[in-house]
Amino acid sequence: MDKVKYVINGVAGLAGIIASKWLGGTDKILFALLCVMAVDYITGLIVAGFFKCSPKTEGGGLESRAGFQGLIRKVGMLALIVIAVQLDIMAGTNIARDFTIMFFFANESLSILENLALMNVPMPPFLKKALEVMRNKAGEGTNEGTSNEQ
């Protein structure tokens, strides 16, 4: 049984090393993005599971398909960071990677604010106003608006 544990740990460690390399290394900016991605997903689960008011499902409750789509979107975000890292390697910079991460950080943060608003968490008026402005801007730029989980 210990051998299985060591093999699993080794495979997980190797996967982490490869992911870190592909994402341009583990630094503060990537860690911040991974944190907000996790918080967004968790708050999306809370909105759907406990508050039953998710805009992502028909009844507002938990739905495995919506949750899986949220995870796939996050993997897609990470894939775009991999592409940005390759652009930076070709250009000899870190600009594309950092701007891509900052864009996704802002998007995930907005989604967290939306989830908290759905939970009726009190927010300072300036954050509510910023959320309204961002929602309107996102609605103008795309047909879907911003994406929050569930």
Image (spheres, helix red, strand yellow):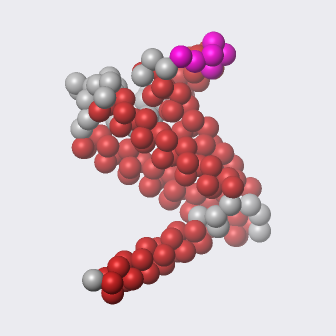
Q: Is residue 82 magenta?
A: no
Residue 12 placement, left or right of 97: left
- Can I make out residue 118 in this image? yes
Q: Quadrant of the N terminus?
A: bottom left
Residue 84 placement, left or right of 114: right
Q: Position of residue 137 (x, y in %)?
A: 58, 23
Residue at 58% from the left image edge and 68% from the top image edge: 20
Q: Position of residue 42 (x, y in %)?
A: 42, 41
Decide: is 11 above or below 35: below
Q: Is residue 123 magenta?
A: yes
Furthest residue in direction bottom, as rendered: 3
Residue at 53% from the left image edge and 27% from the top image edge: 113
Residue at 25% from the left image edge and 43% from the top image edge: 65
Nearest the viewer among 33 and 134 is 33
Q: Position of residue 74 (x, y in %)?
A: 45, 50
Q: Quadrant of the C terminus?
A: top left
Decide: is 108 above or below 15: above
Q: Position of residue 40 (x, y in %)?
A: 47, 39
Residue at 24% from the left image edge and 43% from the top image edge: 64
Can you tell which quarter of the image residue 4 is in? bottom left
Decide: is 1 above or below 150: below
- Can I make out residue 11 in this image? no
Nearest the viewer among 16 and 22 is 16
Furthest residue in direction front, as rendered: 2
Furthest residue in direction right, as rendered: 92
Can you tell which quarter of the image residue 94 is in? bottom right
Count of all numbered marks drawn on residues in the image: 0
Can you tell which quarter of the image residue 108 is in? top right
Nearest the viewer among 121 and 109 is 121
Magenta region: 122-127
